[in-house]
Image (cartoon, rainbow, N blue to C red):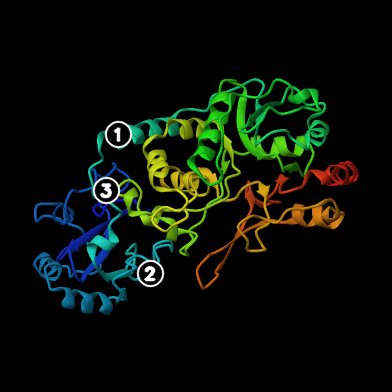
Amino acid sequence: MWSTQRSLYSYSHDYRMNYEGPTDGFHSIWVLPNPDAGRRSDPSPPHSPSLARRSASSSPVESPLSSKDPSSRRSEVHSTSTTKTSMLRRHGCQALMTQKSCLPHATEPPQEGLYGSLLRYCCVCSLKEWLPPVRTRVYNDDELADRVVIRDILLMPAVESKNPKIAFMFLTPGSLPFEKLWEKFFLGHEDKFSIYVHASREKPVHVSSLFVGKEIRSEKVAWGKISMVDAEKRLLANALQDIDNQHFVLLSDSCVPLHKFDYVYNYLLGINVSFIDGFKDPGPHGTGRYSEHMLPEIEKEDFRKGAQWFSVKRQHAVLILADSVYYTKFKLYCRPRMEGRNCYADEHYLPTLFHMVDPGGIANWSVTHVDWSEGKWHPKAYRARDVTVDLLKNIISIDESIHVTSDSKKVVQRRPCVWHGMKRPCYLFARKFYPEALDSLMHLLSNFTII
C-alpha cells in the first residue's frame, strides 16, 4: 500500500520521487528506484520542493527512463514538462492528464517487466495537490495545548482492570420507566456494570433497587443546546472515577436493551473502538448549520453530524473531558436559532471532534437504534400496540448503518457494521419507547430467543 503521508523525497522505502518543474500549474512526477532501499531510512520530509530534487553530486541512479550516457540522462531530467511527458509516454508511463487526482492508482502494485521496478504512473498535476496536507496556520496557545493533551491521551496505553465493567449512563428528565426491564437485563452480572443517572428536572422515583442511590449531581438540560453536552460530560466525569469502568454507554429514559447482557458486554469490550455516529451531510441540516465563526479551529469540511447516543472506550471518555477549545466553539456558535440556523451541539460536537482528532478510532455508527424514517423533527416513538416480535426482529437484524443527506439529492449513505472484520448486527439498544410499552417489552424480550 502506498502511503499518502510520505514525503515527496521518500514516498516509500523502495521508490524515490524525482521532481523537476514549477510548484504550481502542470508538471510531471515519476517514481525511480530508491538507491538507499534496505540500508537506512530516508531523511525527514523536505521543507520545499527544491529539496526533493536530486543534485548533480548525489549518487547516480540508473533510471530506465534515461539513456546510458550520464550527460544525456541529465539532459532529459532537465527537459521541459511537455518533452518529459512525451518521453514518459514513449517509455510506457501511463500519463494522467488531470490536475485533481495525482496518484489515483497508488494502491496498485508497481508494474514489472521491461522497466523493472519502475512504477509506471506519471501525473500531470499541481504539486500542492499531490503533496500531503500541510498545516497552513499557526495554532494559538489554547488550541496547541488542547492538541498536545489529546495527542498524549491517544498515545497512552489503556488503563488495565482486573474486573472491567461497562458504565451505563442514563440521561433522563426524571424517573426511568423501564427500570424493571433493565433490572432483568442486569440480573446476575452485578460485578460487570455500573449505573449513573442524570435527572435534569426532578428526582427519580425508583422501582428497582439497582437504581437507588445512582443519581449524580444534575443540572437542567435544554433540548438541542450545549447543556445536553454538559450533562453527557458530567456523566462521564462521574463514571471515570471508577477505574474498572472501561466502556461508557449513553442512554435515555426511553431506551431498552435488545440483547442479553453477555452479548452486549462482549460486543463492547471485545473491540478497541468507540461507537460514535457521524457522517458528512451537505444539506441544510448538516453543513448548513455550520458557522464561519468556528474558524480557524473548525473548518466547514470537517463539520459532521450524528446521533448523540454514543458508546465510548475509556481513552475516548477522557479525551472528551480534556477538550476545551473545540467544545467552546460549539458552545458559542452552535445553537438553535442563531444567525438563521438551527445548530444542535449534541448532534455535531462529538462527530466533528472525533473526525478531526481520531477518525480511525471510532466506528461510524451508534449502537442505539433510532428510527428517523418519518422525516420529522423527532424520531418515531413506539407505543404498546407497536411492540411486536417482528419489530424487534427487524431492528436486531439490521447490519448496515444508513444515513440520508438533507439536501435535494437525498443521497442514501450505507455503511456495513463490521466487528473484527465480520458483518454484525449494528444495534444493542433501541429507542424511543413510550412507558406504556413496558409490559409488552417485558413479555417479548423475556421469550425472545435472540436476546
Say whether residue 360 is left or right of residue 3.
right
> Is 148 on the left or on the right of 240, as rendered?
left
- Residue picked out by circle 1: 142
**Mark 3 or 2, which is nearer the eye?**
3
What amino acid type should be assigned to the residue bearing mark 1?
Asp
- From this viewpoint, is residue 270 visible? no
Pointer 1 with pointer 3, Cβ within 8 A? no
Q: Looking at this view, is 18 or 173 the one in front?
A: 173
Q: Position of residue 146 (x, y in %)?
A: 35, 34
Residue type at the position of mark 2: Gly
Residue 122 location, x and y as percent?
29, 70
Residue 191 at x, y percent in the picture: 73, 22
Of the pair 69 and 82, the residue shown nearer to us: 82
Q: How far apart, in angstroms, are the residues tagged by discs 1 and 3?
A: 17 Å
Disc 2: which residue: 113
Task: State the mark number for residue 102.
Answer: none
**Badge 3 amino acid:** Arg
Question: Circle 2 sits in a helix, a strand or a loop, which is it?
Answer: loop
Q: Is residue 331 visible?
A: yes
Q: Earlier in the sequence, mark 1 or mark 3?
A: 3
Q: Nearer the viewer, mark 1 or mark 3?
A: 1
Q: Looking at the image, which residue is at 23% across and 69% down?
A: 65
Q: Tell me the tag on residue 135.
A: 3
Picture quadrant where residue 276 is located: top right
